[in-house]
Image (cartoon, helix red, strand yellow):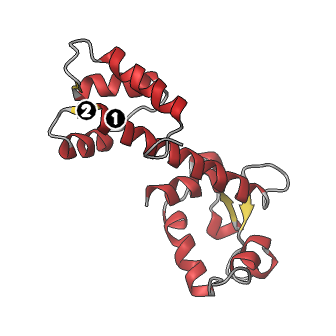
Amino acid sequence: MAEGGLTEDQERDFTQAFNDHDKNRTGFLSPFELSVLMRSLGHPLTDEDMRNITADNDRCITLSDFLNIMAKREQDIALQDKLMEAFMVFDRDRSGFINVGTREDRWRSDFYTQMTSLGPAPFTEKEFDEFMAEYLSSEPVASRGGTGSAAEDGAVDYRELIKLMLKK
């Protein structure tokens, strides 16, 4: 791994891509050029991303800034992949949903049982409720087709839950 969490190949590829988009050879990219580059690499930037990047970098993005952005993106992807693997253990039918139980029957949920009994510091029931609260407040999710909610049936779209977890 190179400095910043990128492999040497990734750093070389990203450096080449940066230089290809730096048409004037100034060593800087404008926010627009960065946006085009990120889209071409499969990492489109949101408006919020652009505001954060330009606020931090005085409206010019250096190669170092870009490599830091890409290292963070690559780390986020690796974490997302690990979380997907972990949640898939509880998705036995590969529906994209896991059962977290409702308040009345959560003891039947393997996910709830594991979260409140395993590891060096398992969740209390209150901590589990707090962990799930943001997801439950953002319901309904598009994958449900606008019907039902996790609070009603205990089924959670773990892809949506991962998105919320990674926003933090």
**Left or right: where does residue 119 sit relative to residue 40?**
right
Position of residue 88 measured from the top left corner of the image (x, y, whole percent) = 76, 55
**Left or right: where does residue 25 sit relative to residue 120?**
left
The residue pinned by badge 1 equals 66
> Disc 1 on helix, strand or loop?
helix
Kindly indicate whether the residue at mark 1 contacts the one at mark 2 (C-beta within 8 angstroms). Answer: yes
Q: Residue furthest top?
A: 23
Give the quarter of the figure containing the N terminus: top right
Report the front residue among 14 and 78: 14
Position of residue 116 measured from the top left corner of the image (x, y, whole percent) = 69, 82
The residue pinned by badge 2 equals 62
Position of residue 3 measured from the top left corner of the image (x, y, whole percent) = 44, 45
Type of the residue with mark 2: Thr
Q: Is residue 57 above or below residue 136?
A: above
> Disc 2 on helix, strand or loop?
strand
Q: Residue furthest right?
A: 93
Q: Is residue 146 above or below residue 10?
A: below
- Snapshot quadrant of residue 112: bottom right
Type of the residue with mark 1: Phe
